[in-house]
Amino acid sequence: MTVSLLVEQLVNGIITGSMYALMGAGLALVYGTMRVMNFSHGEFFMVAAYILFLALGALMLPTIPAALLAILGAACLGGLIEKGLIEPLMKREGWELGTIVTTLGLSFILQNGVLQVIGEEYYTLQYFVDGSITLFGVTLPYQRLLILAVAIGTIALMELFLRRSRAGWALRAVSQDAQAASVVGINVGRVFLMAFALSGALSGVAAVMMAPIQSVNPWMGVPMGLKAFVVVVLGGMGSFRGTIIAGFIVGIVEALGTTVTSSEWRELFSFGLLILIIWFKPEGLFGNVGRRA
C-alpha cells in the first residue's frame, strides 16, 4: 500500500463519514428529543433522491432549485409522518414499541410504493461539478470535495441553530425534560414536529449530495439508514455531537479497512466497530458527555 493510496482512502473515508454524520444527526435529533427510533429514516434519504431525480429530469429544474425541492420534500415527509403516525401513537400506553413497529413497517411501505410507482430501474445523475484536483499525488473529484464542504457547512449551521436560536433552545429543553418544558410554555408538540422535519431535511441534504455518485433506486436508503443507526448508537444515543464524530470515525474505519481487504468487507468493519465499542462502553463513545441533542 502506497502512502498516496492511504491518504486518498483516508480522505474518501472522511467524505463518506460526513454523509453518515448527516444521516445520524437527523436520527439523533429525533431520538434525543422524543425517544423515538425512526426505522424509516433511510427512506427519507431515498425519497429525497427520487425528488431530485424527477426535478432535474421531468421538471427540468436547475440544480439548486431541484436540490432545495428535494430537501423540502424530505422535511415535509418527516413532518407528515410525525403528525399523522407518531403523534397519535405517543398518546397511547406502550407507545415505544408501537413507534418501532410503525416506522419499520413504513420503511417497507415506502420502498415498495416507489417500486410500484416508478419501477426497479437504477437511475444515475450527472455530477454537479465536473473535474478533479491532484494534491501531493492524490486525485480527488470536485464532486466529493463539494460533498464534504456541504456536509461541514450543514453541521455547522445545525450546531448554531441548536446553541444560538430560540427554536434550538426549545428543542434542547424538550430533550432534557418535555414535561418541564411544557410547564414553562414551550409547545412540545411543535418541537416534536420540528425535530422530525429537521431529521428529514438532513437526510435530504445527504441524498442530494450522494445521488450523483450512487444509483437512485428504491433500496438505496437501507444501507444509509443502517449506518445512521450505527453512528447514533456508537456516538451515544441522542448525542448530536457524539453522532457527528462517530459518523466520521465509521467512514474512516470503513475506508481504511476496505483498502487492505475489499469493499465486500465494508459492513463487517462498521458493525464490528459498533459491537466492539458497545462491548466495552455500552452507553456509546460520548454517552457520558451528553445523551441528548
Image: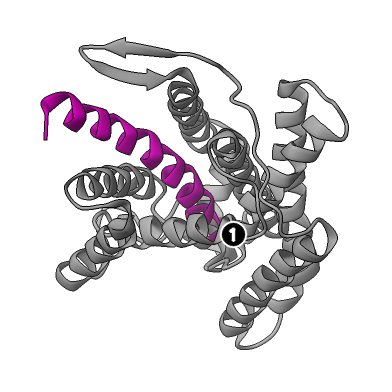
User: Is residue 180 shown left or right of residue 28?
Assistant: right
Residue 228 can be seen, yes or no: yes
Q: Residue furthest right?
A: 59
Figure quadrant of residue 196: bottom right
Residue 72 can be seen, yes or no: no
Crowdedness near tag 1: few (<14), some (14–19) or many (≥20) residues, C-alpha within 10 Å:
many
Figure quadrant of residue 183: bottom right
* Residue at the image position 39 percent from the left and 40 percent from the top: 16
Spot occupied by residue 118 in the image (x, y as percentages of width and height): 81, 56
**What is the span of residues highlighted in magenta in the rendered image?**
1-30
* Residue at the image position 28 percent from the left and 59 percent from the top: 265
Front position in the image: 113 or 34:
113
Identify which amino acid the numbered label 1 is placed on.
Answer: His
* Dominant secondary structure (helix, strand or loop) of the stretch shown in magenta: helix
Front position in the image: 79 or 225:
225
Is 140 within the magenta? Answer: no
Front position in the image: 265 or 278:
265
Is 20 within the magenta? Answer: yes
* Residue at the image position 32 percent from the left and 52 percent from the top: 263
Q: Is residue 269 above or below residue 137?
A: below
Spot occupied by residue 292 in the image (x, y as percentages of width and height): 42, 55
* Residue at the image position 62 percent from the left and 65 percent from the top: 40
- The residue to which callout 1 is attached is 41
Number of marks present in the image shown:
1
User: Is residue 288 shown left or right of residue 1?
Assistant: right
User: Is residue 51 shown left or right of residue 36?
Assistant: right
Colour option used: one colour
Quick one: SS at disc 1?
helix
| Image quadrant occupied by the N terminus | top left
Front position in the image: 72 or 109:
109
Spot occupied by residue 112 in the image (x, y as percentages of width and height): 74, 69
User: Is residue 91 shown left or right of residue 170?
Assistant: right
